Amino acid sequence: MSGPSPSDASSSRAESGLQSHGPAIKVEHIKKAYGDNVVLNDISFELERGRVYVIMGPSGCGKSTLLRAMIGAEEPDAGTVFIDGVDTWAADKKAREEARRKFGVLFQGSALLNALTVAENVALPITRHTDLLKSTVDLMVKLKLELVGMGDAADKYPYEISGGMKKRAGLARAIALDPAIVFFDEPNSGLDPVMVGVIDKLIRDLTIKLGITSVLITHDMASIFRIADEVLMLYGGRIVFRGTPDQLRTTTSPLVRQFVNGDPEGPINAPRQLAELSQALFGASRPVTGEYQAPGERDKP
Ligand SMILES: Nc1ncnc2c1ncn2[C@@H]1O[C@H](COP(=O)(O)OP(=O)(O)O)[C@@H](O)[C@H]1O
Ligand SMILES: [Mg+2]
């Protein structure tokens, strides 16, 4: 028998749940390319324990790739990631598994199993990684579902509940093993603005209440300003900005300002190409507004 009882787990949690005295996460000289596409080009940073970090950047800039390297899901071409002082990519399999038990992940789209109830989904990581008695597991699941306000939905199936409830269930599953660190990949995608606010508050409250180190990937600026202690911007394979939300608001970097303000014109490539496309399609005076519609079989000049 291993593993603490739920009450032990939450008291150790308040003291951060990490063993080393160093940073919760240390990313060291990570490189990753897919063929010629260099996605991560020598990235290094450290994340302190007990804070909420946001990693932001335009679509396709490599946020999920960076996340996969951090959670041990995809090995980088070079560099490594330390979780609570453990070099996860140098460690043997057993040590890597140990390190993995220290964090939970809320994947993009929640990734709940449709054949299982909400409670069974939340129980999955517990039964997989511990040999706790069923009655203990049930208690842990109940506690986690209460924490995310899903106590009444334990026996529902994922296809019976709303998008916001799925995120909550995914969140309950991510914290099922009382992780010291939780990674969230775009926790707000597909939610309406009110629900985004609700989920943001839940993440923020849980992080503080449970003493978790949170790493969120998002490009929702409203969320970033609401939730982040610190923001890192990934662009062109590098971290081009790191600072508090206030520093983000007042930065003079044209690149970062363009992203924060959502300007169609600026140093960020994709929108500029879009602006050029718009100019070609509609003429110089037409501003780019609203949703962009792909031109389909547009004639090449
Ligand atoms: N498994 C893969 N094989 C090939 N290319 C990939 C793969 N995963 C991601 N990419 C490419 O890497 C880049 C970064 O992708 P991703 O990390 O998903 O970006 P983001 O999460 O910031 O939108 C994109 O150009 C994407 O097409
Ligand atoms: Mg992504």
Image (cartoon, rainbow, N blue to C red):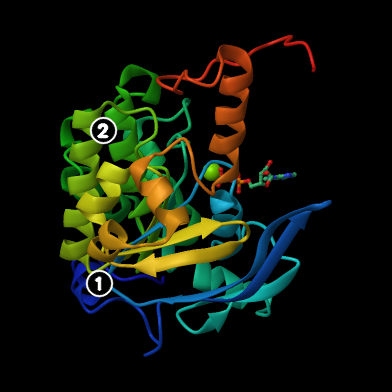
Q: Would you say residue 234 is visible in this rendering?
A: yes
User: Residue 71: horizontal and vertical position, in percent?
Assistant: 54, 61
Q: Residue lying furthest right in this view? A: 35
Residue linked to disc 2: 154
Within 8 Å: ligand 2 and the Cβ of disc 2? no
Task: Tell me where residue 20 sits by quadrant.
Answer: bottom left
Please give left or right for residue 199 compared with residue 190 in the image.
left
Q: Residue at x 18, y 73 (%)?
A: 11
Name the residue located 28 percent from the left edge and 39 percent from the top edge. 168
User: Looking at the picture, how far across and down is residue 79, in whole percent?
Assistant: 68, 75
Q: As shown in the figure, which amino acid type bears the numbered disc 2?
A: Ala
Q: Is residue 250 left or right of residue 42?
A: left
Q: Residue at x 56, y 16 (%)?
A: 283
Query: Above or below — where is 53 with respect to 82?
Result: above
Asked whether 188 or 116 is in front, the reply is 188
Disc assigned to residue 13: 1
Could you tell me which quadrant the C terminus lies in?
A: top right
Q: Is residue 88 visible?
A: no
Q: Quadrant of residue 229?
A: bottom left
How many residues crowd mark 2 within 10 Å: few (<14), some (14–19), many (20+)? some
Q: Secondary structure at mark 1?
A: helix
Q: CA distance from mark 2 to mark 1?
A: 24 Å
- The amino acid pointed to by label 1 is Arg
Q: Residue at x 38, y 27 (%)?
A: 190
